[in-house]
């Protein structure tokens, strides 16, 4: 099935540009591991997987996410609303910490561009035997003013269509009661596989400590999530980490242009806008979340 997807996509005229201008990028996305993710995302339907992969290759050709550098998104990162943590979960998955109440921008275009940068950076830092990440979402200080259906739809589009099977688990930590009806509104935008990876966790729930201990080393986990690490987000230190990663990414993947990439990640939005797959760790989230 993987070979069938690869041979079919090679014949599509729509991917000629990326094959010619970004041959390494094309090869990465036509690797066994990559195609396997697209097949899993489409329940092993070859035709649907081909269509999805074609869409991603077209998107990457136009948007050039691999060319987004820290300097392009630094202003969005100042408050620590999204950042890659210095720790991983017990399965080696990169952790993206998100704090919606720290939103410092009104531009959905800029917000999504920073999300794309964070996704690319998280993938860059995954160990060889892991291909998924954790989203750890802190709802402290979250209010009605932080709710945006449009932003949520754009986030779902990017995650599901351009980074299939990259999310292992999304932990919503202490969401307020008024968030639950909002989630019911946006849940239809999520594919069932994605929705099943969203877990509500409350600090006053007796099971919460067990859930977090099953996933994380508590000495490394931030105190905001019940861990013992008291260190707060430092933008200066984080900027240095990201600049180092940018340099590593350029050396690893190469970059055809130094220009600021296309600012609109979703071509259908409004104006705002070779790892062996057999070695990849598959994590049973239900066991992790329910294990006593």
Image (cartoon, grey):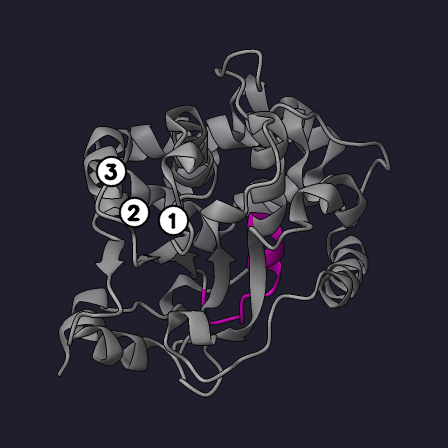
Q: Secondary structure at mark 2?
A: helix
Residue pictured at 45% horizontal, 69% vertical:
93
In front here: 220 or 6? 220
Q: Position of residue 271 (x, y in %)?
A: 57, 11
Does residue 161 appear in the picture of this structure? no
Separation (CA) of disc 3 from disc 2 = 25 Å
Residue pictured at 54% horizontal, 18% vertical:
267
Magenta span includes 53: no
Q: Is residue 93 above or below residue 165?
A: below
Does residue 111 appear in the picture of this structure? yes
The residue where tag 2 is placed is: 40
Q: Crowdedness of circle 3 by 10 Å Cα count: few (<14), some, many (20+)?
A: few
| Mark closer to the observer (3, 2) | 3
Q: Quadrant of residue 215?
A: bottom left
Q: Are marks 1 and 2 in contact (CB under 8 Å)?
A: yes
In front here: 225 or 274? 225
The residue where tag 3 is placed is: 183
Q: Crowdedness of circle 1 by 10 Å Cα count: few (<14), some, many (20+)?
A: many
Q: Secondary structure at mark 1?
A: helix
Q: Are marks 3 and 1 in contact (CB under 8 Å)?
A: no
Q: Which residues are magenta?
A: 119-130
């Amino acid at each position: 099935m993987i070979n069938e997807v690869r041979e079919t996509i090679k014949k599509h005229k729509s991917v000629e540009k990326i094959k010619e201008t970004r041959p390494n990028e094309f090869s990465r996305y036509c690797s066994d591991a990559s195609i396997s993710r697209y097949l899993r995302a489409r329940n092993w339907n070859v035709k649907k997987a081909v269509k999805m992969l074609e869409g991603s290759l077209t998107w990457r050709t136009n948007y050039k996410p691999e060319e987004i550098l820290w300097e392009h998104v630094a202003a969005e990162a100042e408050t620590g609303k999204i950042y890659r943590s210095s720790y991983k979960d017990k399965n080696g998955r990169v952790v993206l910490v998100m704090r919606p109440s720290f939103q410092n921008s009104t531009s959905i275009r800029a917000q999504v561009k920073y999300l794309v940068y964070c996704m690319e950076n998280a993938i860059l830092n995954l160990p060889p035997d892991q291909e998924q990440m954790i989203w750890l979402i802190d709802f402290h200080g979250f209010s009605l003013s932080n709710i945006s259906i449009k932003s949520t739809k754009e986030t779902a589009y990017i995650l599901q269509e351009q980074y299939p099977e990259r999310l292992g688990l999304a932990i919503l930590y202490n969401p307020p009661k008024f968030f639950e009806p909002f989630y019911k509104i946006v849940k239809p935008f999520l594919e069932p596989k994605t929705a099943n990876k969203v877990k509500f966790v409350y600090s006053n729930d007796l099971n919460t400590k067990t859930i977090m201990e099953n996933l994380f080393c508590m000495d490394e986990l931030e105190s905001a999530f019940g861990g013992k690490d008291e260190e707060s987000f430092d933008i200066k230190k984080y900027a240095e980490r990201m600049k180092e990663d940018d340099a590593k990414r350029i050396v690893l993947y190469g970059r055809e242009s130094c220009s600021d990439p296309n600012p609109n990640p979703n071509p259908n939005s409004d104006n705002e806008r070779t790892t062996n797959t057999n070695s990849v760790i598959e994590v049973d989230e239900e066991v992790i979340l329910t294990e006593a």
